[in-house]
Amino acid sequence: MTLKPVKSAPRSDAESLYLSAAGARADDAPWLAALRKQATEEFSQIGLPHRRMEAWKYTDLRALDRAGFAPAQAGTTVVPPLAHGVGEIDEIVILNGLVVEESLRPERFSGITIMSIRTALTEAPQVLENTIGAARPLDRSSLYALNLSLMNDGLVLIAEKGASHPRPIVLRYVNDSVEPTSVHVRNVIVAGEGAKITLVENREAGTGANFLNAVTDLRLADTAQVNHYKFDQCSSESLTVTLANADLGAEARYENVGLSLGGKAARVETQVRFSGEGGLARLGGVLAGEGRDHIDHTTLARHDVPGCACEEEFRAILTDQARGVFQGQISVAPNAQKTDSRMLMRGLLLSEDASMRCKPELEIYADDVKCAHGTSVGNIDDDALFYMMSRGIPQIEARALLVEAFSKDVVELITDEWVRQQFTRQLTDKLGRIVGDWSS
Amino acid sequence: MSQVDEKVEDLQDNAGDKYKYGFVTDIETEKAPKGLSRETVRFISAKKNEPEWMLEWRLEAFERWLQMEEPTWPKVTYPEIDFQDAYYYAAPKSNDDRPKSLDEVDPELLRTYEKLGIPLIEQQMLAGVAVDAVFDSVSVVTTFKERLAEDGVIFCPISEALQSHPELVRKYLGTVVPQSDNFYAALNSAVFSDGSCVYIPKGVRCPMELSTYFRINEAETGQFERTLIIAEEGAYCSYLEGCTAPQRDENQLHAAVVELVILKDAEIKYSTVQNWYPGNADGEGGIYNFVTKRADCRGDNAKVSWTQVETGSAVTWKYPSCILRGDNSVGEFYSIAITNNHQQADTGTKMIHLGKNTSSRIISKGISAGKSQSTYRGLVSAHKRAANARNYTQCDSLLIGDTCGAHTVPYIEVNNPSVMIEHEATTSKISEEQLFYTRQRGIDEEAAVALIVNGFCREVMQQLPMEFAVEAQKLVAISLEGSVG
């Protein structure tokens, strides 16, 4: 019976603003122009993701982004290098959504080709067509479509068979606009057989309110190893939505750990597809929120082949009116026997008004698998606090120690030494504020 | 070992892959015109001789339903339901003259019950169970009324309650599940035909287990039951619900609503064994079971316990919920969901913690075999005021064979820092060692599976009242028939 017309909300200001910026770019190849057209169409029909969409149930972007952010213009700032990284890392700057070409220093890489998407469109179009053109995200949201429709640039990194890069490659998203602006970036990472790279996406707060919508496609060939980390420093007026879309070959290893330190809405989504036997993914994240932060970590692990493993470890530490969201889905296809997956999410609420939403989901179509998930949400253990205080540790320190220990399992997932140090440093700073606020 | 013997018997009974309860009783029924419209709603209301406000209430629900969309979020697939291609009311013809005793009951009906294995008289005498047997949509016979009346307990069809205690029904109906709660609840509110109404007065402990057997009989009739149970302050009652349905090829829609109102210090224990026709081995036919069940713990220290054994229906969509409004109130949910062949079940619970020191416990056991899909979907939500709320959730899935699916979709929402919520889920299969061990001792594979599965479900089985526990164990065995080897 077709009694019920599907209700669709009227188009919001934000949606109209994004649609007005959509359209073909002059240097688009025909396949890309077609993709963009289709994506624009999709976005114009669906609009921004909202709470009536199951995957966005707890992060209502339509409500969080009413006015919209105009696409950013090219920036002029000369971005100084990261204080803690000189000599230890390779920095690539994406200023207002455009790769700063001078920051690409090919001479520092061997066996690895790096270029911007803009360059790749003319110099390596085939690579883009094989990756962006063939991308099949496990869950395609309208924001993904928006990214496809509006993206101008991003990083292309191709590691040849056996290439191994010794330093973390840090991709810095910097914004110097004063007006509220949006940036839509697409990165393509291809790791050949046995290649090893470490990629860090460093989202910096920037000057004004801004919206970062970044999609990173990762193709890991057999036995390749990619360590992928995300740092989000997002101001309280800004939005961050990042999607990592990884496809793992046989015996490939993918590590993805994120640290989210707030924002009006920060959504970190990781989608992993196991396409070859023996793949391993380790996903982790710490959500540290205060004020009115809204932080969402969403993972989707899809086992299409037998014998892969996925470990997930997430922690949320929230105070004030901060809201944390964790959605994790592990999906096991009918023939993906011997899958070994586990997922653990623990949340710590440190104030009366903080809240947490969790949805750890298992979707299993094979019988010989090990899949488990666990979730707990609560406050600091009074017994542990009492134990420490009875041994002479002041209450505030005891609390700080317990909160820090709480996130330790996630920090330990990180194999890269430099990243682990940065992670610990940034987290400790933030926790100092959170626990300090809370005790007063 | 008794269940193994029983299983062997059942297997003999079930020779030829026939649904044990698959038969159609040929009694003339009085039907509403096919399709759903305001006229259908008026027809049903008039048939029931309902008060004016009830008709308005139904029509309001119908208007709301027209505005609503069929939910698509459950992990179930079925062909689109044509709501205009079904009958919304069917009553046994002998309804005009309600029987005063069993002797007056249509013998055809009694034979049906016999085939179902519900010897009413015997059950009355031996088990002390008062049976409110629902044949299609009208409750035909209600027993043990006198004994219950002594204690002031009201236990009657809701249509009768609308005549004898209209104010009671008016006060509580739709207060737990509002008319527009969801698509199927709205549909039920508009066209519900009958169901049970139970009222336990203050301080009364209901002297016997109350029981209703539902049975869908008339072909192509949607069954829309509405049950309302009210436990006044300090009252206690245990309610049993069990169902079987005859075999037919066309899918049938069942959209029931159950509302439980639990006041201060009261307790309701609600147990269900659901064994409706699940469709044949190729997934043809079977019942669509879209049920809204909800308990509202309105007073302090109230307690509700849902226990369900779901083995039947082609598609099940059911989330018995607890609203823990009163301080210190307790909600429990024990569930076994078994799916085989092409069955699909998306079932679970909702625990809404509103009051202080409320606690809830969820034990869910899902068993999938054949080409079936079983999903646990549950919400645990602790609101701002729910200081010191506690929840423990355990959902275990067991897969038999590699063509079925078992899914877990828990939702956890916490808005108070003193809340403690724990959730655990596991997925496993029957191990080769277990099977080898049992077979080595001379137990055939099917019996061994039944034995192991019964063990897997033990925590839930223990919660069932005696009368149901036996039937439930048999059902587990029957449901998994042909799933191994």
Image (tube, coloured by chain):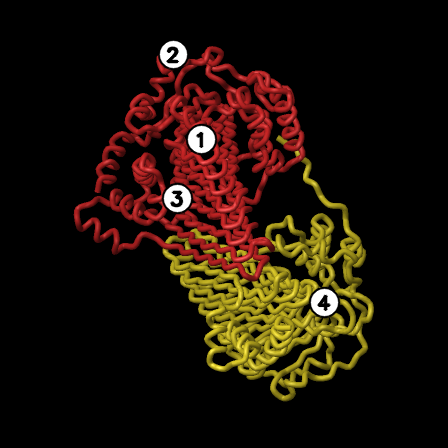
Chain colours: A yellow, B red
Instruction: Find numbered disc 1 in the image and state the secondary structure of the residue it sits on.
Output: loop
Provide the residue designation for mark 3: B336
Badge 2: how crowded within 10 Å, few (<14), some, or many (20+)? few
Q: Residue at the spot x=62%, y=55% of the render?
A: A58
Gap between marks 2 and 4 measured at Cα: 75 Å
Q: In the rendered image, is residue B88 in sight?
A: no
Question: For mark 2, what is the residue?
Answer: B104
Parent chain of label 3: B
Q: Nearer the viewer, mark 1 or mark 4?
A: 4
The span from disc 1 to disc 3 (Cα, nearest Å) is 23 Å
Q: Residue B183 location in percent, x, y?
A: 59, 36
* Residue B193 relative to residue B365: left or right: right
Co-location on one chain, circles 3 and 4: no
Alpha carbon distance from label 3 to label 4: 46 Å
Q: Kindly identify the amino acid type of the residue bearing the numbered disc 3.
A: Ile
- SS class of the residue under badge 2? helix
Identified by mark 4, the residue type is Ser
Disc 3, disc 4: CB below 8 Å? no
**Type of amino acid at the residue the image marks with label 1:** Gly
Residue at x 56% of width, y 28% of height: B169
Whole-percent x, y for residue B206 in the image: 40, 33
Q: Which residue is mark 4?
A: A236
Q: Which residue is mark 1?
A: B285
Work out whether A164 lies above or below A72.
below
Q: Chain of mark 2?
A: B
Q: Earlier in the sequence, mark 1 or mark 3?
A: 1
In the displayed structure, would residue A429 be above or below residue B203?
Answer: below
